[in-house]
Amino acid sequence: MTALASRIYSGHAPLAALGPGERALAYGDGLFTTARVHAGRVVWREAHLRRLQEGAARLGFAAPDAGFLDAAIDELLAAAPADAVLKLILGRGAGGRGYAPDPGAEPTLVLALFPPPPPPPPALALRWCALRLAAQPALAGIKHLNRLEQVLARAEWSAPGIHEGLLRDAAGDVICATAANVFARIDGRWRTPPVNACGVAGIARAWVRENADVEIAPLSPAALEAADAVFLCNAVRGILPVGSLAGRRWTAHPALLDLRRTLARAEPAFA
Amino acid sequence: MTALASRIYSGHAPLAALGPGERALAYGDGLFTTARVHAGRVVWREAHLRRLQEGAARLGFAAPDAGFLDAAIDELLAAAPADAVLKLILGRGAGGRGYAPDPGAEPTLVLALFPPPPPPPPALALRWCALRLAAQPALAGIKHLNRLEQVLARAEWSAPGIHEGLLRDAAGDVICATAANVFARIDGRWRTPPVNACGVAGIARAWVRENADVEIAPLSPAALEAADAVFLCNAVRGILPVGSLAGRRWTAHPALLDLRRTLARAEPAFA
């Protein structure tokens, strides 16, 4: 997909093009976040920017200040359609000697706007991915640029009738989908897996935690398949009910309908 | 460090600049290799290009054909100093919808030349890194662009007297240094760890395997510290004797001196 508009900055200065020494390119040394733009407004904007700052701190570099990020986003949005997807890539900058960064490097910021996603299907059809997520506590939770696991997992299927794939860790526990967090309705509560060894702490996942009764606990494939309801969520598409996984089928669950209504009221992008 | 010269191609066509949809940037979806250029010649050229092709096959995309790669390298070298470091980055290309690649995308090739490394110290001083490498068999062995583990490990120290850090897997076995493979002299043979769960199958490691009596076997920190000699190797700097690690000291070992002489005869870049 081609970007509708994009900007690149090194520190606060516009940059004409990314060079071969860009560490985001060379090592995936950076972070990204993907936000929904609706009616000219970035949904969950503060949470996205806060997560970028937190991710940069985890990787050991300073993100641009929030005022600059805000201004750069506003400048891009001013020239763009009111409904879109905004992607931000924040790299550690250029240069350094091999893996050791240049301590004086300015971070690199790439902003790009893409068309909004098509309307989601009423219920998602899922599959199990064969690839297992590796446990790396030093990188777990943050949305860094090392995403080959997700690329390989997504390449496992091409059938258009399958919307997403679920990923497990080496022990076999469910962690997430390739591009979404997963929640299961178990004993009257929502359960989602911890993301302290692998997986991403999604922005939509954080919204659900604040707006529903959620338990963070390991989730086995058997527990997921026995759940009363299952949904995926991410910051671009909101909450997506799961209708099938392998042989299992789910129909609409009142608690899931309620949660989607609450989200639609709070964020009309997802109505 | 700034590149002395660089070129970018999309398929066989020159590309003016990398865009925000470039998958090597967005996901680290690609490979790289770093070669020594000496007296105008790329050391271990065929092995580097073969590894790029093999890595692309592992990731599920087709690398440019060898004839094109050779021509692109020759064109870049023609305008450059005779002694340098050549870095090739091969990405899956631009676009696609999220993690699912665009099946029609042409791979992106970035070639860049950098100054040669300074002469190595007579013996390296090593440290143990705290970061443990995650086990991911789907990515192990290939030199892909997801290198945040190496970036974080290299950021653990800044003392100029420490030249490299050794990385262990989650079980505690030694795997490699941040930017080199490791060999230990044990019971009259060289031992180097397997790289089928983490680590990179280095080009210099392959040369050593072909030119010495090498056993591929797990290597505990205790076995490494008890070894009669230890060296690191990579394709840019050749074979580098290790002089110290934590409290342990090593002096020059005849088998290591022999191996370095053999390498220097075969590849004068490392004399």
Image (tube, coloured by chain):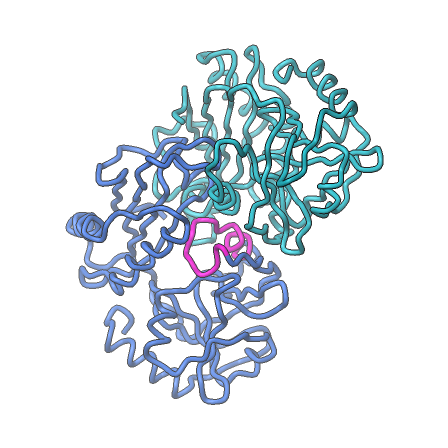
Chain colours: A cyan, B blue
Residue A226: image location, x then y, percent: 75, 41
Q: Does A30 sit left or right of B269 as displayed?
A: right
Relative height, residue B168 to residue A17 (above, below):
below
Residue B190: image location, x then y, percent: 44, 81
Q: Quadrant location of the C terminus of chain A? A: top right
Q: Quadrant location of the N terminus of chain A? A: top left
Identify which residue, A246 or B183, lies in the foreground.
A246
Relative height, residue B47 to residue A231 (above, below):
below
Q: Residue at x 45, y 13 (%)?
A: A80
Residue A112: image location, x then y, percent: 45, 25
Q: Does B20 sit left or right of B69 as displayed?
A: right
Identify which residue, B18 or A168, lies in the foreground.
A168
Identify which residue, A100 or B267, lies in the foreground.
B267
Q: Does the magenta stretch include residue A93?
A: no
Number of disc labels: 0
Q: Does B195 sit left or right of B223 as displayed?
A: left
- For the record, the magenta segment spans B138-154
Residue B196: image location, x then y, percent: 49, 64
Relative height, residue B63 to residue A260 (above, below):
below
Picture quadrant where residue A124 is located:
top right
Residue at the farthest front position: A247
Relative height, residue A234 to residue A103 (above, below):
above
Residue A124 in view, yes or no: yes
Q: Does B82 sit left or right of B51 as displayed?
A: left
Q: Does the magenta stretch include residue B153?
A: yes
Q: Residue at x 25, y 72 (%)?
A: B267
Residue at the farthest right position: A187
Q: Residue at x 39, y 35 (%)?
A: B22
Picture quadrant where residue A240 is located:
top right
